[in-house]
Image: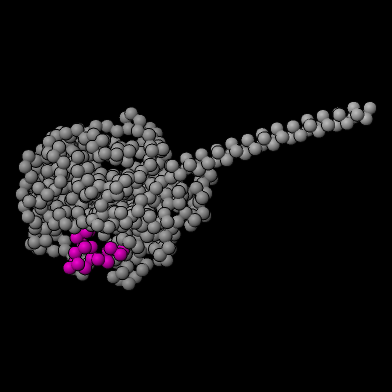
Amino acid sequence: MVLKVRRRSWRILIVTVSLMTVGFLCVLNLLVHELNFSEKIVNRKSENEFILEDPQTYIAQGIRKPQSAIDKSDQDNVNLDQGSYRKYIFTSHNNIPNDIDPDIGPDESDEEYTNGELMEDDDDDNDDEKDNTDDEFHENLKISPQLKKQRIFEPHDFQNMSKLIFAKPPLRFQEVPIINGKQMVGVIAESDRRKFSGKLAVSERIFWSAFVEKMVPKGFSDEEVFNYTINIQSQSVDKVELASWNKCGRPKNAYITLKNKNIVCARYRDSHVRFILGEVLSFYLSRLLGMDNVPAVVLSTTVAGQWSKRNLDRLNWKENQLVALIQWIPNMDTYSSYVKIPKRILKAYQSGQPIRGVHLENATLQEVVELQQWGSLFLFDYLTGNYDRVASMQDAAYEQKKPSIITERIRNLFKSTKTNKFWLIDNESGLLDAYDLMYHKELGGSRFINFHQQMLKTFCIFQKTTVTAIQRLLKEDEPHFYLYNYAMSHDPVLQKVLPNYKSNLIQKWFQMWFQRRLAEVYKWINHCAS
């Protein structure tokens, strides 16, 4: 009897140990599986992480491009579906003269700088000397030979830029619904406000999150913009009105109604071509950067076919002059469309401490959406050197020793009363005249370099698509030629004007400093990332 009990006890013990061993092995197997799964997640995250390259690669020795390009930023969130881009066919239009008039040549600006200030000048002779260059300039301008004839513009013309130029990230903007043929107000939904917290504002330490990008009011896509420019190029002028403070600005400009009832502002600068080129090149740079809040620009010449003599006489314009037709953005002519710098940015400006993700934990969604637009503005104005927006306010505060001026409404920046989107208007000083002011020591405008740096360094959060665009531009040996070719591919008048524009602003200042300022912005982005 005792022997049977002992045998039964041993059997129970053996079964218990066996079950415990099996259980232990199962738990161990689960732990190993979990560790492998976690490792895969980490590896996948590291593969998709946006990688910033060494900015010194671009700054040293003529800012050469890196030997290897690392760019995986857009592969996961950009979908190039069929129909996301189209071919653009350029044909002859009424506003393209057969021969460019001799007046469209060397720039004769009506503005000069004395001790860094803008002064009106009736004598144009000084600019003749400033802009005089040898007659071989157009041979040195490396314009693609295909542009000399009519051609089809293909997305692959710009290597890997198609993702940036022709497609928008699917969640980048909040779509503004169209009801009964009218675009409705771009108001942030209450549900989005409730689920937002400051921790959702930033991703990967230095980029605005997809959620914030989705909430930013939608501008015009590349396809919409280029369809618009093609349409404007073929239209003749129906009615003209003299410019006023709330319609197209300076007295020499005009408020134009075209035959198809589109409204444009016509910027007329007589023979002072640098401002017209600055306007159109700034617009195309904004598109390369993925920005959608700079009004479209189409070049025209005051020739018969598009312009009647009666309209030119009413405006007191000369024939065969270059003008810029600038897209009219409605709903920006009231007091509520004025914009002032937010207190959070003013604090960063005064303290020298940039806004980072940790500073937005208590920010509202509406505040973050506006901050995103301000950051893009500062970066864009840094690249173009525009002195007639925020920098002009800084200059006035400096000259008058009155810091409070920077808190007043900002020049040439308006907010749509329908969508709350910021629009950057009047970019004629960008790239050409601005570079001339800042980097000509005799003109005394070097303090504007500091003004732009101060504003750029108020932010350490950026649009991911814009950073990608800057990387790609810097990989070009000569990014200014890249910009020229891109702009001329879309504007037939620019194709004729730019190669014949004999100015040291392009040959020297723009060529040198555009590349330099791209590298300086990229260096700041890397500083923020580190």
Can you see residue 361?
A: yes
Residue 419: image x %, image y %? Answer: 38, 44
Q: Which residue is drawn at 39% across and 63% down?
A: 349
Residue 303: image x %, image y %? Answer: 9, 42
Can you see residue 245?
A: no
Horizontal placement of 473 versus 211: left or right?
Answer: left
Q: Is 58 located above or below residue 225 in the figure?
A: below
Assess whether residue 351 is covered by the magenta stretch: no
Q: Which residue is drawn at 24% across and 42% down?
A: 263
Q: Which residue is drawn at 35% across and 60% down?
A: 455
Residue 105: image x %, image y %? Answer: 9, 51
Q: Main secondary structure of the magenta part?
A: helix
Q: Is 277 located above or below residue 229 in the figure?
A: below
Assess whether residue 445 is covered by the magenta stretch: yes
Q: Of 29 and 261, which appears nearest the observer?
A: 29
Q: Which residue lies furthest to the front in this view?
A: 3
Q: Of 112 and 496, which appears nearest the observer?
A: 496
Which span of residues is magenta-colored? Answer: 433-451
